[in-house]
């Protein structure tokens, strides 16, 4: 019994040392520019830019293979930050003509299948199996990834309603026009 424990301890120590050496010897440095770009992106992993997540989009930007205006959830502020970092000219966001949207679930139609929960990249949909689901509007990025998996089409997109609490002076459009 004692020899078995010692043998396992010795093997685990040898493999641990081997893994530690391999981690040091074969360490691959990440692209520091891609890391900086990734830090600027909203990390919604929505895929609206045409890439499967924020990190692949950041890597494509670092290689110069993508435009800086593809991130819809980031909006104009992210485009400006990316332009400053990369030394490019700030251009209007690609989805500028599209109003910011938020998902809403029809409570009369929802069957509680949880397929929309699985599809949401930012966990903005809450609920349980066989129960009514809801959307946390402040967390929803409007990526529309929850629409196609819904078997009963109970999810629809609505423009974000702005009230007095969202109002800022001066208005962002007025500053850009000046």
Image (cartoon, helix red, strand yellow):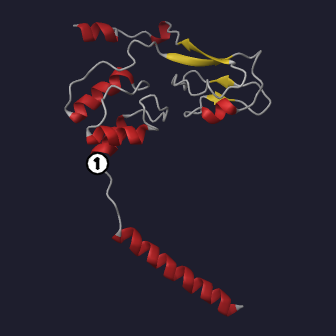
Q: Is residue 26 placed above or below 152 in the rendered structure?
A: below
Residue at the image point whose x is 47% and y is 16% from the top: 100
Q: Is residue 70 among the parts visible in the rendering?
A: yes
Residue 89 position within the rendered picture, expressed as x and y whole percent measured from the top left:
21, 25
Q: Is residue 108 left or right of residue 67?
A: right
Q: Quadrant of residue 64?
A: top left
Q: Quadrant location of the C terminus?
A: top left
Q: Quadrant of residue 173?
A: top left
Q: Quadrant of residue 49?
A: top left
Q: Which sits in the foreground, 98 or 7?
A: 98
Residue at the image point whose x is 44% and y is 25% from the top: 73
Residue 27 position within the rendered picture, expressed as x and y whole percent measured from the top left:
35, 64
Q: Quadrant location of the N terminus?
A: bottom right
Q: Is residue 135 left or right of residue 27?
A: right
Q: Is residue 35 left or right of residue 152?
A: left
> Which residue is under mark 1?
32
Around disc 1, counting alpha carbons within 10 Å, would you say few (fewer than 14), some (14 to 19), or many (20 or more)? few
Residue at the image point whose x is 24% and y is 35% from the top: 85
Q: Is residue 55 placed above or below 102 in the rendered structure?
A: below
Residue 35 position within the rendered picture, expressed as x and y whole percent measured from the top left:
33, 45
Q: Is residue 28 placed above or below 22 in the rendered structure?
A: above
Which residue sits furthest bottom?
A: 3
């Amino acid at each position: 019994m004692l020899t078995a424990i010692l043998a396992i301890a010795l093997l685990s120590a040898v493999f641990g040392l081997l893994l530690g050496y391999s981690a040091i010897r074969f360490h691959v440095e990440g692209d520091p520019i891609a890391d900086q770009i990734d830090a600027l992106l909203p990390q919604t992993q929505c895929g609206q830019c045409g890439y499967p997540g924020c990190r692949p989009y950041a890597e494509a930007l670092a290689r110069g293979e993508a435009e800086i205006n593809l991130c819809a959830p980031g909006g104009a502020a992210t485009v400006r930050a990316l332009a400053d970092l990369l030394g490019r000219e700030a251009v209007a966001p690609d989805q500028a003509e599209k109003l910011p949207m938020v998902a809403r679930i029809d409570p009369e139609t929802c069957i509680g299948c949880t397929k929309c929960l699985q599809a949401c990249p930012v966990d903005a949909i809450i609920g349980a199996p066989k129960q009514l689901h809801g959307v946390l509007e402040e967390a929803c990025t409007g990526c529309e990834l929850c629409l196609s998996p819904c078997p009963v089409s109970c999810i629809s997109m609505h423009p974000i309603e702005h009230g007095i609490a969202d109002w800022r002076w001066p208005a962002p459009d007025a500053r850009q026009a000046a």
